[in-house]
Amino acid sequence: NKTDIGLIGLAVMGENLALNMADKGWQVSVYNRTVPGIEEGVVDRFINGRARGKSIRGYTDIARFVESVAAPRKIMMMVRAGSAVDELMEQLFPLLSPGDILIDGGNSNYEDTNRRVALAEEKGFRFVGAGVSGGEEGALNGASIMPGGSVTAWDEVKPILQSIAAKASDGTPCCQWVGPAGSGHFVKMIHNGIEYGDMQLISEAYWVMKNLLQLNNEEMSSVFSTWNEGKLRSYLIEITANILRHKDKSGGYLIDKILDTAGQKGTGKWSVINAMELGMPLGLIATAVFERSLSAQKSLRESAAKHFVCQRTDVVYNKPEMVKDIYSALYASKLVSYAQGFAVLQRASDAFGWNLDLASIARMWRGGCIIRSIFLNDIAAAFEQAGKPQHLLLAPYFSNEMKQLLSGWKHLVAQAMKEELPVPAFSSALNYFYSLVSAKLPANMIQAQRDYFGAHTFERVDELRGQFFHENWTGHGGDTKSGTYNV
Ligand code: NBP
């Protein structure tokens, strides 16, 4: 009488996932390391506490834990990403049997997962790197789970992972096979990057309402609630409405007492680094990451604010009109952000041979995770069309949306700039959009400069593409060219 699955790591995510599995009828073995002097008794506390009476068995000995799981074993690790996963794997390898499956549900770097899948397979085991989003609440009641790695493992882990995943409104589990190697963790990373972008965009919408329209917290809360009834309906818009009307024990609005310095744990940064490695623009998420960094330089900003006092005009705005423009800026910028994120996924898929199904990924994000929203249905539909669009914004539905939103969006950005009010993500998105729809850009000047100072060569509009020319710009340079390659 062995259990269906083993789970290692009883911190907040592991505990809740184990309870979720037990609730779905699975027999679960759980294990947590015991480090003398750090925190002992983690397993006992769980087994005698929240796990009491459930189909969960606790182990403090890793060999007995592994032994308790039915073969081929499925063992899920929910431990801190990084060296902890490698250390655990080294401990587990001698205890496993051929064909056993390790699942890493932590926020691991996809390159580590690439390496771990290869290592486990070399030893005759299977490895699944599964990004899990949804935090504590998702782990307990239904998360968005993005598994990738050893493909033959999918049929075996599918019933358990799909049972603990959130279900979208049409009943589909928010957990589907992503692809080989580290693709599941790559998709989770981009999910987190998009989350950074969404949060920055919502914050800018809030800031414009507060500073240009002087809306109070209750008024802003109702604007977000109204938006949550329409195309922007999403978890982050919903919680923003709740945050704005939340009062603390003193009776005052808590939002006004929270220090304006944002933290970050690195997944936004990793999205941007990887987009750069792939040569892909991901400007909106980059802006969101950089704005968090600038927000953290509070004392510098306080000094700078004394040197340059931002001037507001004395225009009195038509509030309903400007709220519409803010809506346009938020919705259009969000579309740009998702278009950029999905384009990075497509490029990674091509570069690494992952064969990602972008529609399936969009559908997986409809429930359980932080960026869940109804417009992911439209994204999935756009990628499912015959003749998949070259770019999300070129899908007929979205290009039509952009045409409707543009006037309000650009008006809002121009107005905020005039008022010396920062809207970095709204304007980054707008500039990306204008560049995207420009058949011509000033990159001819960049190529000329590169060739002038470094003989980097250029292509000509009046010659066939793929031929590279060098000009002796000054009359005294040589004819030697630099190699043509792009990084
Ligand atoms: P933590 O990320 O804080 O990890 C704590 C767990 O890792 C504990 O069980 C700890 O054991 C164990 N651990 C460590 Br630390 N080093 C270990 C080692 N060398 N060998 C074995 N176990 C080790 O917990 P979490 O917040 O539950 O997150 C778990 C994973 O899920 C992380 O990768 C996280 O990024 C990811 N994640 C978290 C969230 C969230 O909202 N928290 C959401 C989505 C994904 P100990 O008790 O003995 O110290």
Image: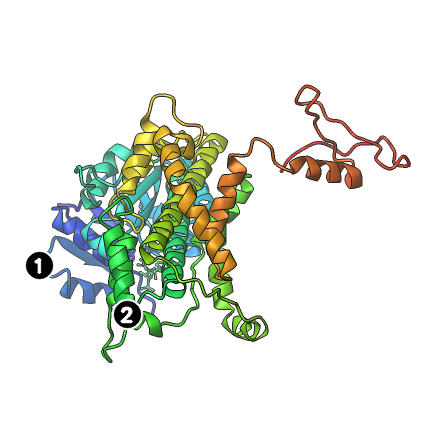
| Quadrant position of the C terminus in the picture | top right
Residue 186 visible somewhere in the drawing: no
Task: Name the one closer to the observer, 328 or 278.
Answer: 328
Q: Secondary structure at mark 2?
A: loop
Residue at which label 2 appears:
40
Q: Residue drawn at (34%, 56%), measured in percent from left and top?
A: 79
Marks 2 and 1, Cα distance to the nearest angstrom? 22 Å
| Sequence-first tag of 2 and 1 | 2
Please state which amino acid type lies under the numbered disc 2.
Glu
- Whereabouts is ligand 1, in terms of quadrant? bottom left
Q: In screen coordinates, is 384 left or right of 200? A: left
Q: In screen coordinates, is 413 left or right of 226? A: right
Q: x%, y% of residue 160? A: 20, 42
Q: Secondary structure at mark 1?
A: loop
Q: Specify the farthest residue to the bottom.
A: 250
Please tell me in which quadrant of the rendered image residue 360 appears: top left
Q: In screen coordinates, is 108 left or right of 243? A: right
Q: Is residue 322 above or below residue 352?
A: below
| Quadrant position of the N terminus in the picture | top left
Residue at which label 1 appears:
53
Q: Residue drawn at (68%, 24%), measured in percent from left and top?
A: 461
Task: Name the one closer to the observer, 290 or 327.
Answer: 327
Please state which amino acid type lies under the numbered disc 1.
Gly
- For residue 37, the mark is none
Task: Name the one closer to the observer, 10 or 387.
Answer: 387
Q: Residue drawn at (16%, 45%), measured in percent from left and top?
A: 2
Q: Around disc 2, counting alpha carbons within 10 Å, would you say few (fewer than 14), some (14 to 19), or many (20 or more)?
A: some
